[in-house]
Image (cartoon, rainbow, N blue to C red):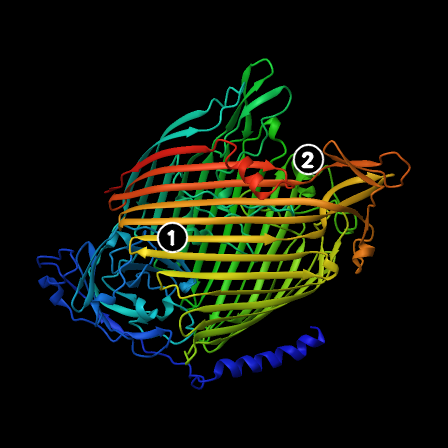
Amino acid sequence: MPSYCRVFLPVFLCFATGVFGQSAAPPAEIISYAKRIYTTHSIEGTEGISLDGSIVEEAWNKVEWTTNYVEYKPDVGSPPTEQTKFKIVYDEHNIYVAFRCFEADPSKIVNRLGRRDSFEGDWVEINIDSYGDDRTGFSFTVSASGVKGDEFISNNGDNFDSSWNPIWYVKTQIDQEGWTAEFRIPLSQLRFGSDPEQVWGLQSTRRYFKNDERSTWQPLPANPPGWVSEFGELHGLVGLKPQKQLEIQPYTVAQYDSYEAENGNPYKDGTDTRPSVGLDAKIGVTNDLTVDLTINPDFGQVDADPGAIALDGFEIFFEERRPFFVENKNVFDYNFGGNQDNLFFSRRIGRTPQGSPYGGSTVYADSPGNTTILGAAKLSGKTENGWTIGILESLTANEYADVSDENGEESEVLVEPLTNYLVGRVQKDFNERNSYIGGMVTSTTRNMADNLQFLHSHAYSGGLDFKHNWKNRKYYVEGSGVLSHVRGSAEAIANTQNSLTHLFQRVDAGHLEVDPNRTSLTGSGGRLEIGKGSGGNWRYNMGGNWRSPELELNDIGFLRQADEIRQYTNVRRFWTKSTSWYREANVGLSQFSTYDFEGNYNRIQYELNSYLNWKNNWWTEVGGAHKPRIFSNTVLRGGPRWRWSEENFFYLFSGTDSRKKFYMHAGYVNSQAKQDNFSLQRYVLRFTYQPTNSINLSLITELEDNPNKTQYVTETSFNGTPRYVLGGIDNQSLSATLRINYNINPNLTIQYYGQPFIFNAEYSDFNYVKDPVASDLNQRVSWYDENQISLENGAYHVDENKDGITDYSFSDPNFSFVQFRSNLVLRWEYIPGSEIFFVWSQGITGIDDPTNSIETIIDNQWFGQKPQNTFLIKATYRFVL
């Protein structure tokens, strides 16, 4: 660590402790609360419960109310502003929960509407650990307006999966004492054992919106060692019988596309129609394990990906949005290297076809945007003896493009082969649920064709992972290891060796070389971390991860870059007791460094950041970093190792109180490298407005200016010597994301999403690499003068030795990318689990001249071309058998 950091860090932490500690009570002792117990009772033999929110049925008198909630945020351990109480009863098929949420002035209850899982306004929830494993649970939430929320809890509260959508029922009422709620949760939606008398974990949380306050039935200390492990207990469950789940949901879709017709192109006549049918099913194999099936799935109601351009050449990671793959995705998660590196990336299934339809005499082609998923199945769940199991199998079709040659003769070209994907995941809890060990395997098998020999025929990966907690889960050590093996033709393996992820062809890499005859690659990776994750005011960890040069996961996983070893350390101080001027705060320091497998020391970074939630519920986040050493093995795309100039950056974000009908946040990021090698200025503005309880509008605008004097352009040759051409780039992007939500009632909603995106890249001041690792930028590159380079007919011609003869040329790299995506969706859940969607999607994509004004670009691309429109109606019906 540099000397100034050794001096600055202790001074900063002492200053922060003093500042945040002003007006605060002395650090509280770490409090351990006794587990609370609630005893329920069966209501068999009574007249039952009619769900209306009134809580007047005689069956409720079988049990007593439980109350005495304790504030968790912001003032942990304090009495809440308003108290809450609940009852729980059950019968042969259901669990019933009644809530009374007191409010002295019922007119202050905030009963905003929203879509399922939006958690707007005042709400109350119950969490049930029916497995009794202290790691997983089921969460059921309702707002005062009657909007449901449901989440599957895993990893002891580290993950709340809102994609889980069980069938359950709830009603709410507002009266003179506050508001009430009645839940009916079918036992078929829960997972539990077969013991004649059971004890489940139990927790309840209420959000008191007026004060942005959380209170819990089972009291919690600040920074608890987990969520599920700290639950109280539900007793009195006698004679419950596990109930297998069987749900079948067929669907039908009618789709109409309109777009600008193209003269002479037989595949672009201006309109397309696409009717489709399919089936989803959920089958309880046992009470613990469920199979999810989908046949010919359709995801037409899913939002489009946001606009993005990557000048570094790496693949952009987009989140999974398709419901079948999102639900229970945590079971199949195997992140091992930080960032997005994972053995399983579900968007590989149904990906855009990788083959090209063009070649030979092809003039026109109609290539599908996505590969057809013939079917997929998931077996997932957790057994009562601590085994978490996940198996996913999917088959995608031979995908063909229709092509037409210059004579008008039509044929088909295979652009993606029949492919089988298999993922298996298992974890086992032990040591009284304080530890687990697990494993994962993946397989991708393609039915290869002669024109697709550039793809791997087989790809396998696997790994082992573990985590051990001790001292009441305050401390932990965790780790994982992975192996990968890919096979294919010599062409396919050569492509992998030369890809940006691997770059075996790097001219200065003594530990790598391209072998054009290889037909397989085997690599490894892993991670090890130890730290303090909860309890008290401090959290910290240290660890490392690695990815060997031959590691390859991108057939079914995600891997950005191989050949890297990373070390990291993080420490963070929390202030959780509110004072006269803030609610909570934290300050953190992190450091990491990277190396490659040849031992090159490539990068070191120190970052300091802090977060403050002010007393008025505004918030501020500020941070900065110093990067004294930045080397990259990928900038020159197979050329030598490249050095960036030393960089410093800082950021500041702040926002107003999100409880208000109108709130906003603003942010600024500034990065600057020495000698103006590159810089970044990013501005973010977000506005959210809730004019009524049923309407919500949000607008996010982002402007980014990212000039760079040494942006990679191309590789060429001069007198037999590789020449890496770079350029100064004036790189700007602008986006605005508008969302409008109109919630007519909890089951009928209209949503609009729209995003214009503009990316301008204008090049000048071209140069070439002279000494790629020189500390001085002027020694690192040499700039062409006006007598060496000229632009003619869309290409730059270089006469490097000024002898009047062009030595090499390259295309003009200037471009302006323009995109607009929008989605209007009406969703009606006409009965629980059954829905109708009306969808209108619109899109425009174009390339323009970056030297044009922004007004000209918008006029040319957004108003000067016909958008593509998609109209879709999708209807589903869920049979619960």
Q: Residue 697 — which label?
A: 1
Dot 2, crowdedness within 10 Å: few (<14), some or many (≥20)? some
Residue under the image location 58 percent in, 43 percent down: 854
37 is higher (above) or lower (below) than 522: below
667 is higher (above) or lower (below) than 868: below
Q: Are marks 1 and 2 in contact (CB under 8 Å)?
A: no
Position of the N terminus, as image quadrant, is bottom right
Image quadrant where residue 247 sits: top left
Front residue of 388/168: it is 168
User: Left or right: where does residue 356 sit relative to residue 676?
Assistant: left
Residue at which label 2 appears:
490
Three-letter code for the amino acid on which mark 2 is drawn: Ala
Q: Secondary structure at mark 2?
A: helix
Residue 141 point in image, percent of width and height: 29, 59
Residue 55 point in image, percent of width and height: 14, 63
294 is higher (above) or lower (below) than 573: above
User: Left or right: where does residue 284 sit relative to residue 850?
Assistant: left
Instruction: Give the spatial CA distance, label 1 vs label 2.
Output: 54 Å
Front residue of 606/144: it is 144
